[in-house]
Structures are given as C-alpha cells and as structure tokens.
Image (cartoon, helix red, strand yellow):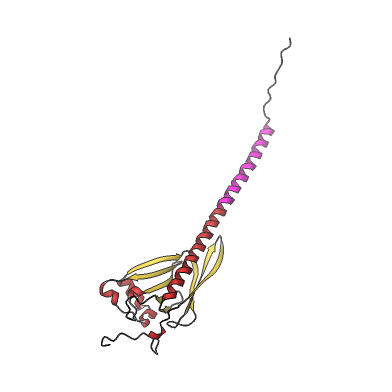
Amino acid sequence: MEKAVFKYRGFTLAELLMAVWVTSIILAAVATLSFALGSANDSSDNTSDIYSRIRYTTVRMSELLRSSKLVCANSGSGVAIWRADDSGDNQINPGEIIYFEAITGNLNLVSFKAAGITASFVLTLSDISNGQARAWLEANCQVDSVTLINNCSNVSFTVDQSPPFTKQLNIFFTVNQNGIARNYQISGKLRCFADYLLNSSGQIDPVDDDN
C-alpha cells in the first residue's frame, strides 16, 4: 500500500515582506487615528475650559458691578472699583475696593483684607487714580488675587464715561484656541451708581466728624 506523502511549504521571502508591509500600513493607520482622537479630545477640553472661564468671569463681573458704587479708575490695563460701602460711612475703605487687572498674561480679580485701624482708612479717588492707593493696599493689607482667565493677551478695559462717572465697563482680550487667536469681550453695568456722593470736582467729600 502506497503511503501518503505530505509536503510542507513555508512562506516565501516575498510573501513575508508583503505581510510586513500590510501590517505596517494597518499599524500606521491605527496610530494616526489614535493620535487624531487624542488631539481632538485635548482640543475639546481646552475649548471647554476657556468657555467655562469666560462664563464664570461674565457672571462674576456682572454680579459685582450690579451692586458696586463707583468705577474709581481705569488705567487701560486695569480698573479699580468701589464694590460696596460695607461700613456705611460713604467713604472708600480698603476692604471695599477691588481691581480687575491684566497681570502677566492673566486676567485677575484682586481684593484686599484689612484689619484693625487699617480697615477704617479712607482711600480718595485721586489716590486710587494715580496709583498711590494701590501701592498702599499692597503694603498694608492682605492681598487676594484670583485668576479669572489665564493665558490671555491684548487685555484692555474701556468705559462709557471716564471714572468716576462710569456706568458700563468692557473687558477685551485674546485667547489662543488650537493655534487660532480669538477675540472676546465681556461687559457689565453698574446698577447702584453712587453719583450723589460726588462733589462738583468729581471727588467724594471727606466725612466731617462734627456732623
């Protein structure tokens, strides 16, 4: 009886090279797709974070301006705002002033905490306007700075009228989103404008202790 003869045949070099080439194409396609999905996810996260910060800043600024007394000064790169008369003395005290400022590529909200006799110190509109009050606050109070929008540029502040007669504040800035520079604007209005405290020179008269 004749035995069956089995012949074993391996892959040729050409077939192996073809298999390697096809596998390489498939792996490259998978890697490209994975990278694209990762980049899209990063881009989406970045855009979501920016929009979140802009929404928060818009709400925060609107709430602050709604109850603020006066916009005290505007340097173009920052504004000083008398947010409320907590002491009820019709004067600007250290803990009542806040600043929206452009600081090293960020838009920050800066406030101050004063204690003791410092808390009742009176800040004049003139000193706030010329920057002396800001230096005094830095030296004598606890500074609290919150970054509202980071990595922004071209930050500028405009008003409808020069302080202290300002009723509307606009903040302009640019944010780089996925390699594209996009411009934004946030606006807010004062609702509790304390113009009745201003004299003919646009200043707040000091409190007379004899009254």
Residue at the far top in the pictured view: 1
Residue toward you, 96 or 146 = 96
Decide whether residue 144 is among the magenta residues.
no
For the point 28% across and 74% down, which residue is it?
A: 118
Q: Is residue 202 above or below residue 86?
A: below
For the record, the magenta segment spans: 9-38
Quadrant, the C terminus:
bottom left
Q: Position of residue 196 (x, y in %)?
A: 40, 85
Q: Main secondary structure of the magenta part?
A: helix
Q: Position of residue 91 (x, y in %)?
A: 33, 81
Residue at the far right in the pictured view: 2
Q: Is residue 55 above or below residue 5?
A: below
Left or right, residue 7 beside residue 97: right
Left or right, residue 19 beside residue 79: right
Quadrant of the rendered structure where residue 142 is? bottom left
For the point 63% across and 45% down, which residue is it?
A: 29
Q: Position of residue 183 (x, y in %)?
A: 55, 69
Quadrant of the rendered structure where residue 4 is? top right
Q: Position of residue 153 (x, y in %)?
A: 50, 68
Res. 79 visible in picture: no
Res. 3 visible in picture: yes
Q: Is residue 196 above or below residue 114?
A: below
